[in-house]
Image (cartoon, rainbow, N blue to C red):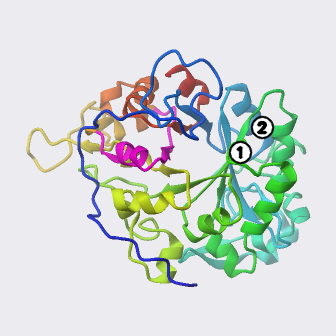
Amino acid sequence: MQRQATWRLCAAALAITALTACKTELGPGDGNGGGPNPKPYPTLDGNAPQSFSLSGIDGKAANTAESFDAAVAQDANFIAVDLVMSKDGELVALSSPDITDITDVSSRSIYANRKTVRLIDGQSHDGWFASDFTLVELQSLRAKLPGSSTPPGNASTGRILSLNDVIAYVKRQRKTVGLYLQTQNPTYHSQLGLAMEDKLLAAFTAAGYTQESAPVMVRSLEVAHLKALRAKSQVRLVQMINGAPALAPNGQILLSAPYGQPYDFTLAGVSTTYAQMVTADGLTQIKTYANGISPWKPYVISARYLDKNGDGQPDDLNKDGLLDYRDREMMPPTNLVTLAHAAKLFVHPWEYRNDVTLLASDFKGQVAAEYKLFYEVGVDGVFSDSPRDANRAR
């Protein structure tokens, strides 16, 4: 793989600064999906922030019609869909190339001999992989919730869908529903001879998704993949910004592998981290190939533990004997939204959940309070497991 163009390096840590007021401008943010705009918002286009469903909501297996039905019922502006590649080069709606825990493949004795070990983004996985199955074989399986041993309720529940199936699904809806596609592990697939770009673009052409205004967006953690798409398409592209799943006690985003930088950067020997990508210079680079960014939400506002008694241990703020997000305090907003909007990039953070253990102490168990705080900062949309609540908080 060719070395990526050198990025100008800035300080890796995001400055924690009070957000200054930003001028709203017309842009491709699709603010409120065409509805009324009852009040001004500090979004890129001045419209209300949008709601994007997660790929699995309402207790339904991810990327299934059942989950999509729930998203439509909750008036999500866009439905999130994950994509991987099958052995025969078809785009399939699955959340990982490793299908061991997201399908019932382990219970299918006919496929027992396909269990193997693969490296995905430098990490070893032991199980079954979509790239070893044709689309027809994958569709003989059923999707399930991770960690669940419960089989799907009936033969039609949890059906695995191709991208063409998903496009047909949204086109059947009475109202326009957007697709927010996340391409999983593009480099991994390319290394197997299963490059995603041309297949994705062919599906867009067949569906009539050729312009920036089309009801589709594509996000990815990798850069070369998005640049390849931009060279051939005008649909909206979104650079995801990752970090290690657990925050440091002081609210710092940790950048340990494989979460610290795009995997194509790792292979190319490029040192730029995700934190450097969301500096002013990094965002200027992103604007050359993308329309927006989709950061993990602590990049916008993080949360820290407190140690008011000075004993060197985080305080158990709610006195429940546990340490979780409810014992953290929200920090001042970073300048990320201001910088992104200055670069004409919209900001779509992830992920917001109706789980009180994931709400900082500031919100007192009220999910609406978290949405409102991020809306006040100016985010242009949020990925949520409850689009209805995200909408109500606008």
The kind of residue on which mark 2 rests is Glu
In the image, is residue 275 above or below residue 6? above
Number of other residues with Cα within 10 Å of mark 2, as a class: few under 14, some 14 to 19, many 20 or more: some
Residue corresponding to mark 2: 66
The magenta span reads 333-355
Distance of mark 1 from mark 2, alpha carbons? Answer: 8 Å
In the image, is residue 194 above or below residue 71? below
Residue 339 shown in magenta: yes
Percent from the top left, x then y, of residue 349? 48, 44
In the image, is residue 131 above or below residue 347? below
Q: Is residue 64 left or right of residue 276?
A: right
Foreground residue, 115 or 344?
Answer: 344
Percent from the top left, x then y, of residue 172? 87, 35
Report the magenta stretch's main SS.
Answer: loop
Q: Secondary structure at mark 1?
A: loop
Looking at the image, which residue is at 80% across and 41% down? 65
Looking at the image, which residue is at 69% across and 73% down? 189
Looking at the image, which residue is at 35% across and 70% down? 8
Number of other residues with Cα within 10 Å of mark 1, as a class: few under 14, some 14 to 19, many 20 or more: many
- Mark 1 and mark 2 lie on one chain; the one further toward the N terminus is 1
Percent from the top left, x then y, of residue 199? 79, 65
Residue corresponding to mark 1: 61
In the image, is residue 299 above or below residue 275? above
Foreground residue, 216 or 324?
Answer: 216
Q: Is residue 151 left or right of residue 302?
A: right
Residue 194 shown in magenta: no
Percent from the top left, x then y, of residue 204? 79, 54
Q: Are marks 1 and 2 in contact (CB under 8 Å)?
A: yes
Q: Which residue extends farthest left?
A: 310
Q: Is residue 307 left or right of residue 137?
A: left
